[in-house]
Amino acid sequence: MLPRMREIHSWLMDMDGVLVNEEQAIPGADRFLARLRERGIPFQVLTNNSIYSPRDLVARLAASGLEVPEQAIWTSALATARFLEDQRPGGSAYVIGESGLTTALHSAGYTLDDRSPDYVVLGETRTYSFERITRAIRLIADGARFIATNPDPTGRGSHGHRHRLRPGGRHGDDPRAQRPHQSRGRRAFPVPGLTDRRFRR
């Protein structure tokens, strides 16, 4: 006899590759979300992409035909901000990343500091500036703690191909994301998983 399945009270789901692939909704994703809303089942969409804020992602998902409320989106930027707020409330950070990450840190009470920050935070970005990476290396050498928003060394690009532009990876990853810890022998501390209850709302 097959074991009885436990009732599902809520859903946690990845965004990239589960709901959308690039700018296109995965077939059936809209019907699945509609069914959850119809049955009143709460859900949370997770993404390890720190580039966009939840509000940005709401608009991008809507353009793909998917209706997801802002409060149902949890990003690696939010997890990073919550983690740092827990570790050192009211701290400061030097950030290599986009507005999704800086906005989350500001909302957590953090200030951006390029002189003597508590942390150097490496997120995803469209372009890696040699000047900013050099500054990050110097700040880490001076004692700033090094944090990565996402330990996954690869990300999904167009046509399903994998690319290596993630922070916190291993040998063979994009050299721009590797320079801060290779130059001083330090590896970034990856933020605990997106589903860690300590860093959820």
Image: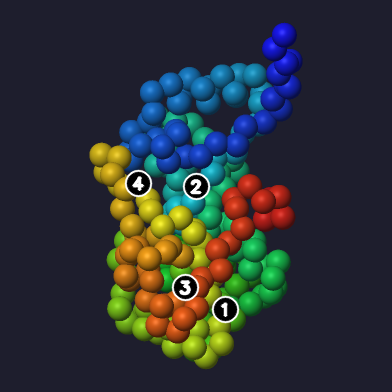
**Residue for badge 1:** 145
Query: Residue 172 placed where, x, y %?
Result: 33, 63
Question: Among all residues in the image, which is located at the extreme left?
Answer: 159
Query: Residue 127 placed where, x, y %?
Result: 30, 66
Residue mark closest to the camera, 3 vs 1 = 1
Sequence-wise, the earlier of marks 3 and 4 is 3
Element marked by disc 1 = strand
Sequence-wise, the earlier of marks 2 and 3 is 2
- Which residue is located at x 57 percent, y 78 percent? 145
Q: Residues within 10 Å of mark 3 (few under 14, many from 20)?
A: many
Sequence-wise, the earlier of marks 3 and 1 is 3
The three-letter code of the residue at mark 2 reads Thr
- Which residue is located at x 67 percent, y 51 percent? 196
**Residue for badge 4:** 156
The three-letter code of the residue at mark 4 reads Arg
Residue mark closest to the camera, 3 vs 4 = 4
The three-letter code of the residue at mark 1 reads Arg
Pick the front one: 32 or 180: 180
Q: Residues within 10 Å of mark 4 (few under 14, many from 20)?
A: some
In the image, residue 40 sits, relative to residue 13, either above or below, namely above
Q: CA distance from mark 2 to mark 4?
A: 12 Å
Please tell me the numbered disc located at residue 95.
Answer: 3
The three-letter code of the residue at mark 3 reads Val
**Residue for badge 2:** 47
Query: Residue 162 placed where, x, y %?
Result: 32, 48
Pick the front one: 135 or 103: 135
Q: CA distance from mark 3 to mark 4?
A: 23 Å
- Which residue is located at x 67 percent, y 31 percent? 10
Q: CA distance from mark 2 to mark 3?
A: 19 Å
